[in-house]
Image (cartoon, helix red, strand yellow):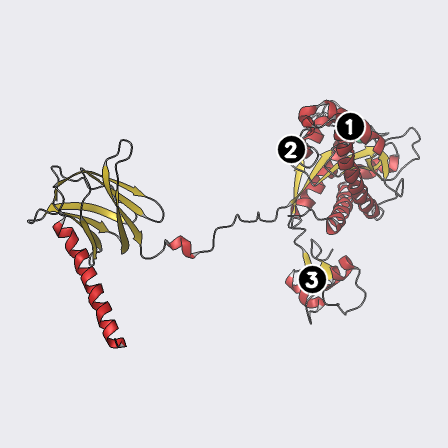
Amino acid sequence: MGLRERVRRLAWGLGLLVLAASAGGAWGAPAEVRVGGLRVQESAERVRVTVELSGPVDHQVFNLKSPDRVVVDLRNAQTSRRLDSPPEGRILSGVRSAERGNGDLRLVLDLKEPARARTFLLRPEGSAGHRLAVELEPLQAPARASFPPVRPAEPPPRNVVVVIDAGHGGVDPGAIGPTGVQEKRVVLGIARELQQLVRQERGMRAVMTRTRDVFLPLRTRVAMARRHKADLFVSIHADAYEDRKVSGSSVYALSPRGATNEAARWLAERENAADLVGGVKLDDKDDLLASVLLDLSQTGTIEASLNVGDRVLRELRGVGELHRTSVLQAGFMVLKSPDVPSILVETAFISNPDDERRLTNARHQKSVARAILAGIRRYFDDYAPPGTLLAARRHVIGQGESLAAVAARYQVTPDALRAANGLRSESLPVGRVLRIPADRGS
Ligand SMILES: [Zn+2]
């Protein structure tokens, strides 16, 4: 047998098979099927129309265009009820039914867009009887599938929060100068000036513990700093001493000893302590572990506080004399937030007649505020908290990039850029990270 002969025989055999298959439906015509209700389920990807039947049914499915519709012919079937058109969906706009003269029942599924139809018969199961399921799948995938999967957006960079605390207030006047000037009044003046300056800073936000002459418990001030998720807490005071000759500014951070005592106190107040240490819940740790965790947190905080204090102190040097040239440490209550770098600025000795007079001077108050801000700015230049606008102000030098170009890009002067980065020469090595100063011309 030649090749041609074999192919012919094969084709003939296949033809017979096809004939048998198509004839099968007609020869084995089932008894009349009654069609009950319709159910429509729609998901994002497809619609399923379920037709309730009294028994298995022979059927044919095909698509028609203009308008798009899917036709399902049910052999030897009828319905005694008008099939309710289901509510409109994304793909399906309605269902119609009609009995054809030959005993068939025709279902027409009207579509809003071209869809591929698949059908399958379902056997009785539980309370459900025989069913025909028609699944419609749009030829075009849903529009949103053509976009990359939606990723949670990164939060936009935030401002650093500076909590400004004017010491004393209300029934507590603080220290009183030789001519009767009250500490609570002058420090509020300086705090307000500082608030104005912080407000003008790009990337910073100011929160005042008090803006009026009111009494605030120390713990309330600490609580405010924590509630506002402060990045820095600055308490403003004026010192007093029995020797009226003593004068000048000083800056304090918390002493480790004060911290240790306070840690014990925080631990005693378990409700407060629960979220103190970077999300570590203290209530299910033993006391020793908890105190170690809290200690570590506060050690880092004190270090940060010393860093801010140092910079503020250096700036205050330009305003008047310093009482002490390094940051002092003491157990001030307001400095005891375990997780907020905190400093206390003794702006001057109100007990010194010269200092007292200058403290009441609006221009001097402004100068002190400006110095504190400059120190704060330098601190955030070096230690911008991640996720803040200030942290975003870093620039990596690219090939052939000039100082002037970088300065222009960030709207700062080349001098400010040079000063902020301690640059002496004009050449910028590729890959060098520049700190962009937060304010032009500083
Ligand atoms: Zn004070």
The residue where tag 2 is placed is: 227
The residue where tag 1 is placed is: 288
- Crowding around mark 1 (Cα neighbors within 10 Å: few <14, some 14 to 19, many 20+) is few
Q: Are marks 1 and 2 in contact (CB under 8 Å)?
A: no
Whether residue 422 sits left or right of residue 413 in the image: it is right
**Sequence order check, earlier mark of 1 and 2:** 2
Q: Amino acid at mark 2?
A: Arg
Can the viewer see residue 211 in this picture? no
**Sequence order check, earlier mark of 1 and 3:** 1
**Image spot of residue 131 (x, y percent):** 23, 40
**235, above or below 432, in the image:** above
For the C terminus, which image quadrant? bottom right
Q: Is residue 67 or residue 12 the one in the foreground?
A: 12
Q: Amino acid at mark 1?
A: Leu
Q: Is residue 434 or residue 366 the one in the foreground?
A: 434
**328, above or below 4, in the image:** above
**Residue at mark 2 to residue at mark 3: CA–CA distance:** 35 Å
**Residue at mark 1 to residue at mark 2: CA–CA distance:** 27 Å
**426, above or below 135, in the image:** below
Q: Is mark 2 within 8 Å of ligand 1?
A: no
**Image spot of residue 413 (x, y percent):** 71, 62
**Residue at mark 1 to residue at mark 3: CA–CA distance:** 44 Å
Judged from the image, the secondary structure of the residue bearing numbered disc 2 is helix
- Residue at position x 70%, y 30% from top? 221
- Residue at position x 35%, y 49% from top? 45
The residue where tag 3 is placed is: 396
**Image spot of residue 86 (x, y percent):** 23, 41
